[in-house]
Amino acid sequence: MPVERTLSIIKPDAVEKNNIGKILAHLEEAGFKIVALRRTHLSRAEAEGFYAVHKARPFFGELVEFMTRSPVVISVLEREDAVDTYRKVMGATDPAKADAGTLRKLFGSSVGENAVHGSDSRENAKIEIAYYFPASEVAPSV
């Protein structure tokens, strides 16, 4: 299976609760290599652009408000089958329905405040990574 990359965002709720280190450790223990990492406070324009696919959805405004309320930690993760593996490590969108030991079960509190974001496909991973990281800021593939 080829090595691939995916985007991870530790959302404001998890950052506010000082869970950055625990989440990053969990990812490394799951076999991910962190090849780019940034802590930032998203602007409204950045959040609206990133989540533009959801613009027509009723939760869009609330999502943008949430993602801009305090800092986030954005990273590029690398390993074999990164996208699908990270989706499993994250757990279900609703922390109450997530499997034990997943990031959302451990650190999320609701569907809206579920601790982490991850790319949902290989194609979107490439788009999302490029949205936040110029190629010069991502470690070259080995």
Image: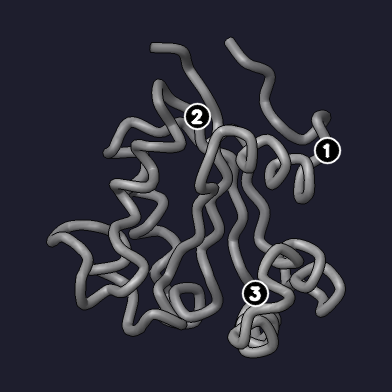
Query: In the drawing, does residue 63 fall left or right of residue 42?
Result: left
**Is 88 situated above or below 107?**
above
Q: Which residue is mark 2?
A: 78
The residue that disc 1 covers is 134
Callout 2: 10 Å neighbours few (<14), some, many (20+)?
many
Q: Is residue 95 left or right of residue 61?
A: left
What element does badge 2 sit on? strand
The residue at which mark 3 appears reads as 71
**Of the pair 50 and 134, the residue shown nearer to us:** 50
**Separation of marks 1 and 3 at Cα, in angstroms:** 20 Å
- Residue type indicated by callout 2: Glu
Q: CA distance from mark 2 to mark 3?
A: 23 Å
Q: Residue 2, percent across and down?
A: 46, 12
| Relative to 86, 118 lies left or right | right
Please tell me in which quadrant of the rendered image residue 103 appears. Answer: bottom left
- Nearer the observer: mark 1 or 3; the answer is 1
Relative to 48, does residue 92 appear above or below in the rendering?
A: above
Separation of marks 2 and 1 at Cα, in angstroms: 16 Å
* Residue for point 36% across, 68% down: 93
Residue type at mark 3: give it.
Pro
- Answer few, some or many: residues within 10 Å of disc 3's Cα (few below 14, many 20 plus, some between 14 and 19): some
Which residue: 38% across, 37% down? 84
Question: Considering the image in quadrants, where does the C terminus appear?
Answer: top right
